[in-house]
Image: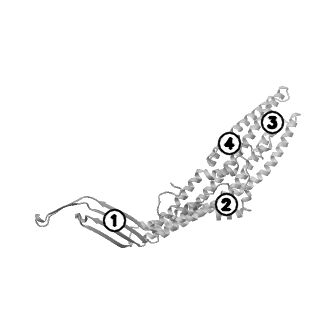
Amino acid sequence: MRIARGVIIGAFALLSSPCVAETMSGALSRAYVGNPDLNQQRAYVRATDEDLPRVSSQWRPSASASGQAGYNYLDSISGDAALRQRESSIPRSVGLTVTQNLFNGGRTLNGVRQAESNIFGARESLRNTELNVLQNGATAYMNVLRDTAIVELRKNNITVLEEQLRQTRDRFNVGEVTRTDVAQAQASLANSRSDYFTAQANLQNSVANFRQIIGIQPGRLEPARTIENLLPRSLDSAVVVGLSEHPAIQAALHAVDAAALQVKVVEGELYPTVGITANVQQNWAYAGFAKQQLFNTSLIGQITVPIYTGGEVDARARQAKETLGQARLQADLQRDFIRASVVSAWGVLDSARAVIQSSRAAVKAAEIALEGIREEAKVGQRTTFDVLFAQQTLLNTRVSLVTAQRDRVVASYAVMAAIGRLSAANLSLNVAQYDPTIHFDQVKDKWIGLRTPDGR
């Protein structure tokens, strides 16, 4: 019995259920919109945006109002009892204090620049999360297709072997074959059923991963194509693109900038600070006298020059410099990692192309061989073992072809991710693309307000 080629090359078979088939583009669009990992990273970027107005607040004045009221009883004696004075009053006062920083050793300026570097780094980390989610989504999609096709192949193989066992028993009953041939057919059928159950377990695992990444249970999945047309022409070009564009490297470089600015922020604590304080205060029933009032206003400039801090600031400055060195090494490590990832993914893609060609040839040859061996077995020139072995060979080549087709698609997405270009925009997904600059523009110049831009 011949297994339909469509199981292998057409649609990899499919899961039953909905009428409308899910496409790779649709699945990745779902992941882009609803994947929890991607959404939590977006929330992290929005939280990081708030570092800029927080640090910028050191440039702005701070104001505080105060007020107090109470009861006061005064019993005063001067000289003799004739000059004794008793008086009760309710002393009250209100005041306003405004403080403005004029110079703090450049800590605010460097802190603002550091916040901007951290924000840019968070955006690159978001891009990195996006490409990882899309790559994982594509892998999960193809795993379901592959495992569904393998389950169908295993299932069809059971049907073929059941028929083979029936024919072998019939031939045994008429004395054409021995009991050994029947036992071989039975063993082959039992192994095929075991492989079928294993394939089912693998499919269930792939379905669970699909549900975790995409957000829905997979229904009927359409076959997916590779995205090799979006890739650079050569491995060398891919490496160059990866080293210049990959978000993990860009995030590491922004981390270097932030670490360098942290050194300046700490060193700024050893510089003089200059500020000005304005104060206005009105008192009633001042000093316990009910009719006495006092109005006071002041404008005071202040300069503070640190002389010795016990070595604490110095230690933090040295620590920040070591952290800067670590950040630079981390950037170098990311470059090496991305280079290796590009080379590895490119090699897998090349290998998958070659395996597909050889597997197609192997399937065709195995089909011809099986047909010939079956015909020869009918006239006694081949044994049952030869037929079973040929059937198993054909099954293995078909499974190899299915796996290679899956590997080629997955590898194309892996190369796209390794060079840093796997994104909703480059894949032309039908989604409203998330723009982190919108939230940044909404909060960067905010002086006041507890609500987030979305109303929380």
N-term-proximal mark, 3 vs 2: 3
Earlier-in-chain disc, 1 versus 4: 1
- The amino acid marked with disc number 3 is Phe
Circle 2 SS class: loop
Q: Look at the picture and state if 439 lies above or below 264.
A: above
Q: Regarding mark 3 in the picture, which secondary structure is present there?
A: helix
Where residue 369 appears, as percent x and y from the top left, is 84, 42
> Marks 1/4: CA distance?
73 Å
Separation of marks 3 and 1 at Cα, in angstroms: 102 Å
The 10 Å Cα crowd at callout 1, few under 14, some 14 to 19, many 20 or more, is: some
Spatial CA distance of label 1 from label 2 is 61 Å
Residue denoted by label 4: 203
Q: Earlier in the sequence, mark 3 or mark 4?
A: 4
Instruction: Please give the residue where the numbered disc 2 appears in the rendered image.
Output: 419
Q: Nearer the viewer, mark 3 or mark 1?
A: 1
Q: Tag 4, which secondary structure?
A: helix
Q: Are marks 3 and 4 in contact (CB under 8 Å)?
A: no
Residue in view at x 71 percent, y 45 percent = 21
Q: In the rendered image of this protein, does residue 395 appear above or below residue 230?
A: above
Name the residue carrying label 3: 385
Q: Nearer the viewer, residue 103 or 367?
A: 103
Q: CA distance from mark 3 to mark 2?
A: 50 Å
Q: Amino acid at mark 4?
A: Leu
Q: Position of residue 437 (x, y in %)?
A: 58, 62
Assign a secondary structure to mark 1.
strand
> Vertically, is 388 above or below 289?
above
Q: Which residue is mark 1?
A: 95
Q: Are marks 3 and 1 in contact (CB under 8 Å)?
A: no
User: Where the N terminus falls, by quadrant?
Assistant: top right
Whether residues under marks 1 and 4 lie with C-beta atoms below 8 angstroms apart, the answer is no
Q: Residue drawn at (70%, 54%), measured in percent from left and top?
A: 411
